[in-house]
Image (tube, helix red, strand yellow):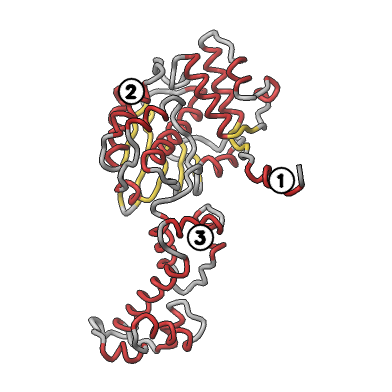
Amino acid sequence: MTEAHRTASRARAPTAATPMAFVQAIVRAYTARGMDAARVLEQAQITPADALDAAARITSQQMEQLSAGAMRELDDEALGWFSRRLPWGSYGMLARASLSAPTLGLALARWCRHHALLTDDILLHLASEGGRARLAISEQRDLGGLREFCLVSMLRNALGLSSWFIDSRLPVAAAEFPFAPPPHAPAYAVLFDGPTRFGAAQAAVYFDARYLALPLTRDEAAMRQMLQHALPLMVRQYRRDRLLVQRVRQLLAGAPDAAHNAHALADRLHVSPRTLHRQLKEEGASLQALKDEVRKSRAIELLRRTRRPVKQVAEASGFASEKSFIRAFRGWTGLSPADFRRHGAWPDRSPA
């Protein structure tokens, strides 16, 4: 194998970021049932020595394989979290009940409501306010030593299923958990996009509420194939983000006078610059076109509503010079900024 091939192979290799504490929680579920987890650990390529190493990590694929095997062997899709077992197929039943919903918001609302039919040890709540959606868990009993694993898994399952429903990445703006930071707290930066806060009142994740309006793209055939395994945990596996154009536009509009290079925007969106450009292209857009759109909107607003000099309008719209602004504005409107202002409406003549 050449060095180039080895480098490419390493780049494609999945990141081992899932804490071994979650593996140890599954082993405890086996112990509570008087069963041996050796076979399922071997299937997930986790050695007994690794399973005892609290500092070790496994990949998300290993975690999905381990979870699926344990759920089948224990016949408990809750993996010991609740006061009674949830036999294999319980979450598949909930997923099917949500599949006919026209939008993700209604599908998630059904998921939360129907989950209470499986167990009342926890309750799921979906709310939306101020453009931000919140999926939260209220604990109705002490979850004991499996508390962290339960709360993290429930939220990741819901996010993974939601991403699968709409065939889109669903980026998490923030996550909260009602316990102190565990020793493996840095792993949460990989488990959830956005910052994680510990010591909160409830476990919850926040995301852009516009995702709730997206239609479901899956059918029954896809559901049958998906349910051959445990519910999907991975959100990052989806190539596209169906709200990426809106999210980029929002970031640009929030600071129209900033430079907004691809690297800075990609970092804010938790993708690589190459992925950012590719996904925008898939959505029929480009970063430059979106920047021009936001700059144009900002410039027109300032020319119509304020008496700022053209030079100041250019700066506030993100242009390095007045000349480049005038040239771009002529291309957008066919008029110079001064001519546009003379012919445009001024709803508000108060000084800027």
Spatial CA span between label 1 and label 3: 25 Å
| Residue 7 horizontal side relative to residue 20, left or right | right
Residue where numbered disc 3 is placed: 277
| Residue 130 horizontal side relative to residue 324, left or right | left
Please state the horizontal and vertical placement of residue 269, each as a whole percent of the image.
Answer: 49, 55
Is residue 231 visible from the viewing direction of this image? Answer: yes
Residue where numbered disc 1 is placed: 5
Spatial CA span between label 3 and label 2: 45 Å
Spatial CA span between label 1 and label 2: 51 Å
In which quadrant is the C terminus drawn?
bottom left
The residue furthest right is: 2
Please state the horizontal and vertical placement of residue 260, each as a whole percent of the image.
Answer: 51, 68
In which quadrant is the N terminus drawn?
top right
Q: Residue at x 32, y 41 (%)?
A: 216
Above or below residue 121? Residue 211 is below
Residue type marked 1: His
Q: Residues within 10 Å of mark 3 (few under 14, many from 20)?
A: some
